[in-house]
Structure formats: structure tokens, C-alpha cells
Image (cartoon, rainbow, N blue to C red):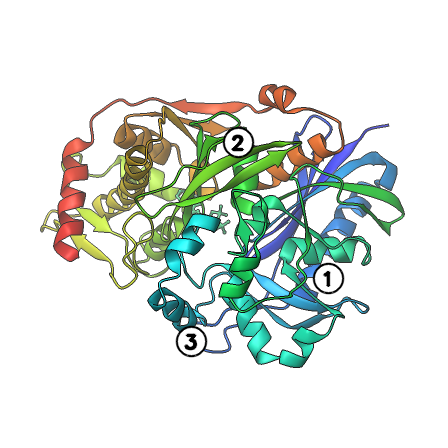
Amino acid sequence: MKKYFLSIDQGTTSTRTVLYDSKFKYLDQKQIEITQFYPKSGYVEHDAEEIWDKTYKTLRQLLRKYDLKSNQIISIGITNQRETILGWDKSSGKPIGKAIVWQDRRTSKFCEILKEEGLEPEINEKTGLLLDPYFSASKLRWLKDKSKSIFKKSTTLFGTIDSFLLWKLTEGRVFATDITNAARTSLFNISNLKWDDDLKKIFGLEGIKLPDIKNNADDFGTTSLFGGEIKISGMAGDQQAALFGQACFDTGEVKSTYGTGCFLILNTGTKILRSNNKLLSTVGYKIGGDVTYALEGSIFVAGSLIQWLRDKMKFFLNAPETEKFAKSANKNSEVVIIPSFTGLGAPHWKPDLRGAINGLSLETSKEDIILAALEAICFQTKDLVTALKNDGAKIKSIKIDGGMATNNFFGQTLSDVLSMKVFKPRNIESTSLGAAYLAGIGSNYINLSELKDVWKVDKLFEPKKSYEKKYLKYLDSLESLS
Ligand code: ADP
């Protein structure tokens, strides 16, 4: 009898379930988009009931399509959008109001007040994070202020999307999260690996019951919703799942995911590496008694720059065409793009900066601008890698994934710009693969060292030419904007 893994990947724009065979080979997936609610400027909400319905549907569709019985599923892994928070009723399992999504900025004033009170250093020391509405704690405080009576009720549970999905899958038997999701709430102490009462107090959340914290490969209970029992034994936030799916198991290994934005994570080993460059210290993963820390930086605009060229500039119809156009650009083009459409993320943190194109001449073609767009994403990655190095990291190579990783011209340019080897794996869906790997370990099907041999490279890009001159031009342009 053939056996499989199911990986639930609950993202910001869609929910999907991916089917892997017992050797972690990608077989198929079912994906459904989820509704985005923008009730006010700066507000972003999700309907958690819709998220659950669609998650359940994708699971059921895959099982039905291949006529799979529950005893053919070795285990389920869950990965999810991080930081998004909600409350739900313990007995009915129904969400109370909408989930507040990680992008939501409604608590920026509250965070400013805490900053003025001088609380950021303590929060940073304990959590490795910055004081920002991005993380769950201030959003949870908002939920508390909005509905004090609900908050007091012992029948209400609060948690991130992972814990809600787990509650639903186990029909209310398990109220738990994993260590990487916990690490993004701002209520979790990354040194002693526990919920922190001082942090709860800072955010005005004393007495709140938070989910039990489990390892990433662990016993998360079972689901009986699909016939017999299926184990759930892997869980991680999306970026950490991608780190794991890229088999970045050694200190100094880096993965960079290029989707709408770009998320770069470095494995810093058993030690917390503190950043002087506004990168976030966080938990990479925990297996058994061993915790692996990570340093994370994100770029707001990556694939969305390509989308802008496609949808607003109408330069091409499909993102993959950028490869062909960039190859025929003028090799001496001086065009530089600063893609700060929505400000700049790490390590610059300039929320109010807006985008610019420099170095235009009458010779400039569409191709030159497309080339500059791909280069801009590489230059921003170099800024992050430089920040990591300045924080003491030793990085020799980088593993890429996400939609843009399919662009080989981009992979080569990245290698040139970073003067570093760039690896593209066979499966660029590292996030769902990471959750499947974790489910494999959690169900005692495979161990970490065996997994190293499972991960396979599709393409290796090695530096061929120097990009120093154009990178300096980019830095000059950036400086002139700020
Ligand atoms: P997300 O998970 O954030 O929705 P994906 O990982 O699916 O993103 O990647 C989609 C993004 O990658 C889009 O913004 C798209 O413009 C970009 N993209 C996809 N394929 C290519 C390509 N071949 N070259 C350049 N950009 C691409």
C-alpha cells in the first residue's frame, strides 16, 4: 500500500493542501483563494471560518481525487501565515469576529505609546522582535479592548491561525501552537522558550490563556474528519517551514523566498544572534530538545515589482517573459530602480520612502527597465546579506525559492551581485515541503540527517561577473532619495 504526506499551507492570499509521496516527492495540490477584508484604511482582516472551510475542502478534494484512505496518510503537517490572530468560542469552535491579519496597522498608535514609554529594548531583548503592529500581541490587545466581556469569558480561546486549524482538525481536543508561531506573537521569550508574564503585562494581556507550545516535529494529536484517524505531527510558521524545506540545517545556511515580497532567513545555530541592523532574531525550529535559532530580514517589494511592470506599465503579459527581455537589455544600461513603493524593509526600515527610477536616457528601453527591476531585487538581497554579515554571520551560499526562483536569469544575476553560490532546489515550494518534512520527523518516519539526502538541487548558479559598479550606483540612488 502506497503511503503519503499531506501538507496544509495556509497563506495570506490562499489556502492549499499539497500531497507528497513517502519520499517527499511533490504529487499534486488543491488551492483556493481566501477573501481579503479591508474595512478601513490600514485594516486587513480574514474570516477564519472561511479559512477553515477552504482548508477542509482542499484536504477532502485531494483525498477524494486519489481515493486515499486515512491509513495511507503517514501524517499531516501544517504551515501558515504568521502573526495573524483571532478568538473563537471553545464549545462551538466559531470565530468571534474577524481575524486580524499580520499586515494590519491598526495598532500603530498603541505601539508608538509603548515605544515612548521606553519598552522596546525589553521587548526586543525577550522576543528578538521590534515593537511593531506586525506582531500579534498589540492586535490581541485590540481584540481585548473591543470586547472586554468576551475576553473575560473562559469559553473564548485566542491563538494564531495554526492553533485554530489544529483545534478544528482535532475537533476541540488540542489547543496548541508550535514554537515558531509562538515566537512571532511578541509574548514568547526566545531565551527560556516560554510564554512570558512580563510581556503579557506590557501588552495588557495578564491572565490570558494561550495555547500549549510544542516542538515543530511533535505529537499534535489526530484528526478523525476523513474516515479513520490521521496523525498531525509537523507545524511551523511559513518562513520557518521554508527554511526547513530548504534543508538549511547547518549554522550559516540561508534561504531566501521570492514571492510578492522576499523573506530571507539565516540559521544561526544554537545561539541567538542579536542584530545591530534591525534584523529579527527568532526561532528557526525545535526538534526534540534542540532549538535552532534564526535571523530574519524581509524586503517588502520583490515579485510585486514584476507585477507592477506587467499590470501598470503593461511591459509584458507574463512574469516569465522578464527573463527574455532582461537578456536583450543594453549591457551598459545605467538605469537603477529603487522599489520602495511601500517603503523599504530591512535593513533600511524607511516606511515613508517611495519608489524611483534613476539613470534614464533617451536610449533607455523597456528591456533596460526590466533588467533594472530584476537587479533591484538582487541589490536589496545584497543589502540584507551585508547586514547579516555585519551582525557576525558567516554566509557562503544562499538557497532560493518562491515564484521568482523559476527565473534563471534572476538566479544568475543574484549570484553575480552577491558574489556567492545560489542554489535552486528541485521543489521550489519549500514552505509546504518543510511542513511535510516536519510531519515526517514528528511521526518517526525519518530523521534530520536522513532528510539532508532527500533535499535535491535543480540548479547551481556561480558568480560569473562583478556587479560592484552598478550596486554602488544603486546605493547612491538610495542615498539621494533618503
Ligand atoms: P506569493 O506566494 O507571494 O503569492 P509566489 O511565490 O507565488 O508568490 O510568486 C509570485 C510572484 O513571483 C509574483 O509577484 C510574480 O510577479 C513573480 N514571478 C513569478 N514567476 C516569475 C518569473 N519567471 N520571473 C520573475 N518573476 C516571477
Of mark 2 and mark 3, the one earlier in the sequence is 3
Residue drawn at the location 57% of the way across and 25% of the way down = 455
As measured in the structure, the alpha-carbon distance from the residue carrying label 1 to the one carrying label 3 is 27 Å
Q: Are marks 1 and 2 in contact (CB under 8 Å)?
A: no
Tell me the kind of residue under disc 3. Ser
Can residue 327 be seen here? The reply is yes
User: Badge 2 is on which residue?
Assistant: 246
Image coordinates for residue 283, horizontal then vertical, percent: 52, 41
| Quadrant the C terminus occupies | bottom left
Report how many numbered discs are placed on residues in the image: 3
Which type of secondary structure does the marked residue at label 1 adopt? helix
Image coordinates for residue 320, horizontal then vertical, percent: 41, 42
The quarter of the displayed image where residue 263 is located: top left
Q: 473 or 141, which is in the foreground? A: 141
The quarter of the displayed image where residue 144 is located: bottom right
| Quadrant the N terminus occupies | top right
Above or below, 19 against 341 in this view is: above
Tell me the kind of residue under disc 1. Asp
Above or below, 127 against 157 in this view is: above
Left or right of residue 285, residue 3 in this image: right
Tell me the kind of residue under disc 2. Gln
Q: 88 or 474, which is in the foreground? A: 88
Q: Do the residues labelled 2 and 3 touch (CB within 8 Å)?
A: no
Image coordinates for residue 109, horizontal then vertical, percent: 39, 73
Estimate how packed mark 3 is, as few (under 14), some (14 to 19) or many (20 or more) residues with alpha carbons within 10 Å.
few
Q: 158 or 357, which is in the foreground? A: 158
Image coordinates for residue 388, horizontal then vertical, percent: 33, 36
User: Badge 3 is on which residue?
Assistant: 41
Which type of secondary structure does the marked residue at label 2 adopt? loop
User: Badge 1 is on which residue?
Assistant: 53
Residue drawn at the location 29% of the way across and 43% of the way down = 380
Which type of secondary structure does the marked residue at label 3 adopt? loop
